[in-house]
Image: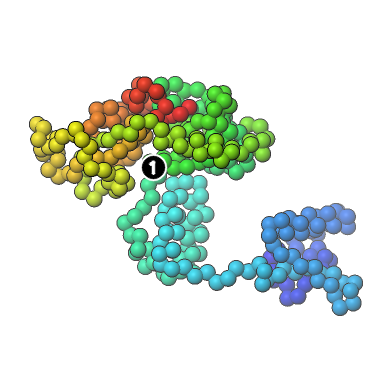
Amino acid sequence: MIALVNTAGRMTKEQVRSSVAGYGEAPSDDAFERMFERDKDTLRDLGVPILTVTGAHGDDIGYRIDQDAYALPPLELTPAELGVLALAAQFWQDQALRTDTSRALTKLRAAGEGPESTDLVAGLAPRVRAAGGALTPLVDAVQARQAVRFTYRAASTGDVRERTVEPWRLLTRRGGWVLVGFDRDRAASRSFRLSRIEGKVRAVGEPGAVTPPSREALEAALASWSSGEERVATLAVLPERAGAARARAVAAPVGVGDRAAEPGLAGLLAQRDVVHVPYRSTWELAEELVGYGDAVVVLDPPAVREAVLRLLRVAATLDGAGSGADDPAGPSGREVDHG
């Protein structure tokens, strides 16, 4: 492709064979012809417009790339557009694509309005916890439509067992990565937090073997994250902290009193804002709140407070064995781990 892009007019097959690395190693004319036709077809499949150009006498065939059809127009980014792309690059800073996004952002800045372009989004940053080694193989499996097998620790019971899953979609939810797919062992769609996958994710079967879900099946699987009774947690939040939780805040529900009057809370609440946040999954909310550290204190309900404390104790002792056991989310056990 580089050779054809930079040729002044056209290149014959003989010129390609003599000047492009790799073709000179062909053991025969037939082998070169197969290599040349294969690579030419590959470039065309990728959308590269290769033209066949005949010489003046009609017996001298050459090739070139149609620059008008292939070249991109000049790239012009507004400050707001470049700022949003900078946020997208930050999103991947702890993930496998960090190098690629950093290089891309450097090139985009060269075409944009300059470093000051990001001032429009100063102070904003996407907050998604790293998914460890599970993300890259799952991204590959989703794209290749290939089943995977991994060891998973359920939040509802703390059980650790092997799962075989046909991956459908990867998404972020409340600051963490989630895999939505078809659990072959349970013959139903399930959702799995990548933070609860232990060990390596292994590919199973051939690429292309996974049948994409119907639109209805995918929508039903995604909607399961919103199932369950909606409740409200009362939080004491430091000023200008926990912006994502504040953005979902609602008015104080009926029956929720002012806890500032309770003994021992006056000093705590004097420097904090009381925020009421709706939620459906106890453990999902707890995992989000733990990420804010001491900026958030759970006042109510006790189940959320205990879930947060349990996660903090596990982190303090560096013992991950019990982080999902005795889930206080409710009797159904489906609120976070649908598997």
In the rendered view, how is the structure colored?
A: rainbow
Residue closer to the observer: 337 or 23: 337
Q: Is residue 125 left or right of residue 41?
A: left
Q: In which quarter of the image is the N terminus?
A: bottom right
Report the label total. 1
Which element carries disc 1, helix, strand or loop?
loop
Residue closer to the observer: 255 or 236: 255
Residue closer to the observer: 175 or 259: 259
34 above or below 242? below
Amino acid type, label 1: Gly
Image quarter of residue 39: bottom right
Instruction: Estimate the x, y position of residue 278 in percent, counting from the top left.
Output: 30, 38
Q: Residue at x 41, y 36 (%)?
A: 226
Instruction: Estimate the x, y position of residue 58 in percent, counting from the top left.
Output: 89, 74
Instruction: Estimate the x, y position of residue 153 in percent, counting from the top left.
Output: 45, 26
Examine the rendering and report whether any part of residue 76 can be seen: yes
58 above or below 278? below
The furthest residue to the bottom: 56
Q: Residue at x 24, y 28 (%)?
A: 302
62 above or below 133? below
Q: In this view, does 298 lie to the left or right of 59?
A: left
Q: In this view, does 74 lie to the left or right of 123?
A: right
Q: Which residue is drawn at 38% across and 30% down?
A: 228
294 above or below 27? above
Q: Residues within 10 Å of mark 1 (few under 14, many from 20)?
A: some
Instruction: Estimate the x, y position of residue 271 in percent, counting from the top left.
Output: 14, 45
Residue at mark 1:
175
Q: Residue at x 31, y 56 (%)?
A: 123
Examine the rendering and report whether any part of residue 317 can be seen: no
